[in-house]
Amino acid sequence: MKRFFILILGCVFVLGMISGCTKKESKAVETNKDNSEWFNNLETEDVDGNKVTKDMFSSKELTLINVWTTWCGPCVGEMPELETLSKEYENNNNVAIKGLVVEVEGTDIKTGLSDEEKNLVKDIMKKSGVTYQQLTVSEELKKTDFKRIVEFPTSYFVDKKGNFVGEKVTGANSKEEWKKIIDERLKMVKSNE
């Protein structure tokens, strides 16, 4: 019986790692013009307490915003891949990568992070070798449909104005998969110019 329980627990863990992490929520949200205020009106802070606005998008043609949470194995697991890409694109003025850390109370996304949560994020960053900027959820962002995100990690692409570019990407990806997606989104941005 004990082996059976361990087998079931192992299967649940593996399925979680494959599919990503979710929070209990009834309805998923889509990237559309009705939700464009998520990022094109962005005002928040990063985990170091620095003020961040939508102006951070203006210097890049495309920004990948990776929404993750500290309790999600696939989220943390893909961070080194995203760091490698961030460094590769650092000298390329076309693409930026940002993290957006979400913590949840019950089924509700929290605003900001406690000092303990910030320290945990910084510890994860250090262990993963991550240096790209990590944003927190502002009260304004929480007032939008962003609060209904149900899967972690979920990534969004935005243009210089913070408008969505293509559909969201759910689940973790390898470096090669991300490069392919980024190249596709860059083509979308350039075709809209």
Image (cartoon, grey):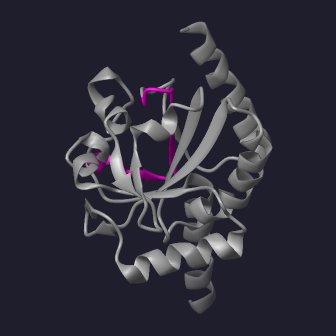
Can the viewer see residue 41? yes
Residue 192 x %, y %: 54, 9
Residue 73 x %, y %: 58, 67
> Residue 130 sits in which quadrant?
bottom right
Residue, far left = 143
Q: In the drawing, does residue 113 fall left or right of residue 8?
A: left
57 magenta-colored: no
148 magenta-colored: yes
Can the viewer see residue 174? no
> Residue 28 sits in which quadrant?
top left
Q: Nearer the viewer, residue 91 or 125?
A: 91
Q: Is residue 80 above or below residue 53?
A: below
| Residue in the picture at 66% in, 61% down | 131
Total numbered circles: 0
Image quadrant containing the N terminus: bottom right
Q: In this picture, which residue range is highlighted in magenta?
A: 147-162
| Residue in the picture at 44% in, 27% down | 164
> Residue 14 sits in which quadrant?
bottom right
| Residue in the picture at 67% in, 57% down | 78
Image quadrant containing the C terminus: top right
Residue 148 x %, y %: 29, 47
Q: In the drawing, does residue 140 fall left or right of residue 11?
A: left
Q: Is residue 167 above or below residue 18?
A: above
